[in-house]
């Protein structure tokens, strides 16, 4: 996979999974137990990891190649 395609894919994942987090903060999602669980323990970690990958992924790839 080309680097530009990988970046676009990770960016879209990051943006799309941020929507439920906004619903958790500003909407009634926090009152729905299953949705709150998914937002806290699935969507939030994936968004954090994808953000870190977009920010420092090139550094990790460089270090792993040695």
Image: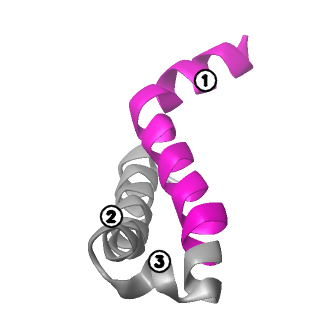
Image quadrant in which you'd find residue 9: bottom left
What is the basis of the colouring in this image? one colour
**Callout 3 secondary element:** helix
Q: Which residue is mark 2?
A: 15
Q: Residue furthest front?
A: 31
Residue range (magenta): 38-66
Q: Residue at x 37, y 85 (%)?
A: 28
Q: Residue at x 33, y 77 (%)?
A: 23
Q: Which residue is mark 3?
A: 30
Q: Check if residue 65 falls in the magenta segment.
A: yes
Q: Residue at x 52, y 19 (%)?
A: 59
Query: What whole-number distance in Å separates the C-alpha atoms at marks 2 and 1?
Result: 22 Å
**Callout 2 secondary element:** helix
Q: Check if residue 44 falls in the magenta segment.
A: yes
Q: Quadrant of the C terminus?
A: top right
Between label 2 and label 1, give the one nearer the viewer. 2
Q: Which residue is mark 1?
A: 60
Q: Residue at x 51, y 31 (%)?
A: 57
Q: Residue furthest top?
A: 66
Who comes first in sequence, dot 3 or dot 2?
A: 2
Query: What whole-number distance in Å separates the C-alpha atoms at marks 3 and 1?
Result: 35 Å
């Amino acid at each position: 996979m080309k680097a530009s395609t990988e970046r676009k894919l990770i960016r879209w994942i990051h943006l799309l999974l941020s929507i439920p987090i906004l619903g958790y903060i500003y909407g009634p999602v926090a009152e729905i137990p299953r949705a709150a669980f998914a937002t806290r323990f699935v969507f939030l970690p994936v968004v954090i990891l994808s953000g870190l990958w977009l920010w420092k992924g090139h550094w990790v790839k460089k270090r792993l190649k040695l």
